[in-house]
Amino acid sequence: MSTAIRVPQQERSIEKKNKIIQAGYELFSEVGYYGTNTAEIAKRAGVSTGIVYGYFEDKRDILLCVLEIYIDKVYKPLAHIVDKSPQPVDMRRLALSVIDKTIELHRQNAKLHNTLHSLATTDEAVNAHFISLENKITEQMSKQLVKVGISPENITEKVHLAMNIVQSYAHETVFDSHSYIDYAKMKELVCEILVELFR
Amino acid sequence: MSTAIRVPQQERSIEKKNKIIQAGYELFSEVGYYGTNTAEIAKRAGVSTGIVYGYFEDKRDILLCVLEIYIDKVYKPLAHIVDKSPQPVDMRRLALSVIDKTIELHRQNAKLHNTLHSLATTDEAVNAHFISLENKITEQMSKQLVKVGISPENITEKVHLAMNIVQSYAHETVFDSHSYIDYAKMKELVCEILVELFR
Amino acid sequence: MSTAIRVPQQERSIEKKNKIIQAGYELFSEVGYYGTNTAEIAKRAGVSTGIVYGYFEDKRDILLCVLEIYIDKVYKPLAHIVDKSPQPVDMRRLALSVIDKTIELHRQNAKLHNTLHSLATTDEAVNAHFISLENKITEQMSKQLVKVGISPENITEKVHLAMNIVQSYAHETVFDSHSYIDYAKMKELVCEILVELFR
Amino acid sequence: MSTAIRVPQQERSIEKKNKIIQAGYELFSEVGYYGTNTAEIAKRAGVSTGIVYGYFEDKRDILLCVLEIYIDKVYKPLAHIVDKSPQPVDMRRLALSVIDKTIELHRQNAKLHNTLHSLATTDEAVNAHFISLENKITEQMSKQLVKVGISPENITEKVHLAMNIVQSYAHETVFDSHSYIDYAKMKELVCEILVELFR
DNA sequence: AATGAATGAGCCTTCATTCAT
DNA sequence: AATGAATGAAGGCTCATTCAT
């Protein structure tokens, strides 16, 4: 029924597939999933409409790939920061680095983040994808933190919680901009919470 | 040129408008904004397609109304809990109540929550609506907390942050279900954070 | 099947019917038949949507009535001018009067004129209505012209033709505004043609 | 955001675009602009609904194209007649040719003519299109008449007026069919007027 | 007679996906 | 592998007309 999806092995093909993903990434970020159509993706990727369906099963399939690189783009730098932290770790300094990096990343990706999360609600596969990739990064961060001297007790819970908190804060800062909030002060509070959490 | 929107004053009309909002609420929750069409909304509300546009400017207008009652449904009970808390407040107990209530609410509304947040990214009006209503509740909670003996220092920042943290946690619990996470333990951590935050 | 259309005999009713026609007249003139909806007509007439269908069979029926008063509004003043012309008639003077009056009328009614003519193409009943009412006025003008000394030979043909010419000219002046045309000169030409025609 | 309109260069595409225009031409002629829907146009053109929007921006855009070929179809043959007239011109013979051709053309296109004119009232772009194309033809005719010996004095005014008169007459003949009019006689009158006009 | 809320068919347009080349 | 024209189902919205009150 459905034409088999090519798994591109040749360089040119892989390059083309990546271009499509990149185009999807940009467009989903800019105008959301429903604000983007496949023709637009193809155009921005510099390929024909039809060939998109040579590399992807459907539009949603592109989203799944975008999700993968999104996770990479957002979590890898954070993991990197944690990986590089000296032993014994200066948690306050680390917390600040993570917060700042998260804000920066969020500033670039917040729209996509929301789009992705919203679709996760509707689409079980997207959700699963999201979760499994999230898991990996949590695990890795946890390991690294333990390595640099943090107590292994409930470490995954702590990491996950910490990440959520930082992300909430970043979202606040980048997006909601409640005028009455002193975001510098709030950042200080977040920092203290994290320090306390991993004490 | 544009047909005027009825502002229903008669009981019957208000009832009907609410039915439409309720139908929108349910459908947006179940299948998201883009997964819902106006005919479906009308059908579930037990009205004709046309009359929907007698009460609402367009589909998005329904969303705005759904957003309003969503905010009510989600935040009011929380404000209520805070309002009822005795003086001097037992913060641990209060935190637990809020967390539990938030989880309950999230269990009912999480899909809509995501849909709404995602649209806020795309639609400035939705965003504004969201923010302004969020403001109100933050302010109210802050006042109440001060009244029951919490230090007024950076209280809005703290309340906002606290709400974000609780919501993140609730979302985790209801949705992501990372198998390796001990959510009971995580809850304990959240609780401690909140107690510490408002000490 | 269809509810009987009231033939309003009471003053109030007649007044109301006329208001509806007047509203239709204005709106059809302003935005055309398809740019007008019945709710708008009712609103401008100061009546309810429903009652419109108490006085008229449908939207088209309103148009038919509008057509009637349009014919009156446009042709009566012209007939009047002809009726008042002294014996023996000064054709040049008469022609000028008719031209000027037609322009004036056209300036007020040209949009409606077009709307009406266009519908006549599509709608046989409108066409018939149009024609029969046109006939009356032609006949009357012809009689009058003969009375004031014009040769009865082919008088209806001449009157009809004359009216068409004048109308074309009026339309040109009011509407098309071709920049390279000297409309004063053109008017002079029309005038000469008419004088010659009825010599 | 908006899908780009294909400018068809390949034969097949041009052919298809023309088929759509032709379908529009026919349907607008038969049942008017508002009596036609795009699905119908597509069907008659033998294409899918969607592809119509690959060639045209919207329904109105089709109308604009129809307008263009309408102008061609109606005015070109007339220009042709004038172009071919010998020098010195036999105005009576020329007038008769033009009248007869106009009637013939009108018989085929009168409905569309009305539809078009009516829309010109409502739609500024249609109006502009109409006027500019009208201009061209008037200019051309005027030049040609001067070339074959007609006095250049007020020639554009005369040509324009003449065309209007002939069109009025043609419309009368084809459409209104007032029973009491002797159209043969009327034609004679028109002919005389034209001869006189260009003497 | 009158109201105006309600109906629902129908329209224009978009877009994910397919297909001829 | 690639193109991009073509498909057609689906959606948001309007509006002439009806109906309960």
Image (cartoon, coloured by chain):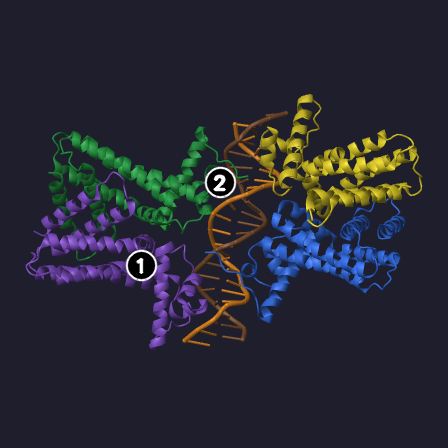
Chain colours: A yellow, B blue, C purple, D green, E orange, F brown
Give left or right: position of B145 versus C108. Answer: right
- The chain containing the residue under callout 1 comes to C
Q: Position of residue E4 (x, y in %)?
A: 50, 68
Disc number for residue D53: 2
Query: Quick one: C191 or B39, which is closer to the camera?
Result: C191
The residue lying toward the viewer, choosing from C11 and D90, is C11
Residue at 74% x, 52% y is B110
- Left or right of A83? Residue A120 is left
Specify the amino acid type for callout 2.
Tyr
SS at badge 2? helix
Q: Amino acid at mark 1?
A: Val
What residue lies at 20% left-to-right and 62% top-to-bottom? Answer: C136
Which residue is painted at 24% across and 61% down in the image?
C133
Q: Position of residue A108 (x, y in %)?
A: 69, 36
**Is residue C139 visible in the rendered structure shown here?**
no
Residue D74 image point, x, y percent: 28, 39
Task: Please determine whether, in this image, residue C67 is positioned above or below residue A4.
Answer: below
Q: Which mark is residue C126?
A: 1
The answer to whether residue B92 of the structure is visible from this angle is: yes
Q: Residue D120: give x, y in percent of width and height.
A: 34, 47
- Quarter of the figure with the C terminus of chain D: top left
The N terminus of chain D appears in which quarter of the rendering? top right
Question: How far apart are labels 2 and 1 at the CA level?
Answer: 34 Å
Q: Residue furthest bottom?
A: C10
Image quadrant in which you'd find residue D87 = top left
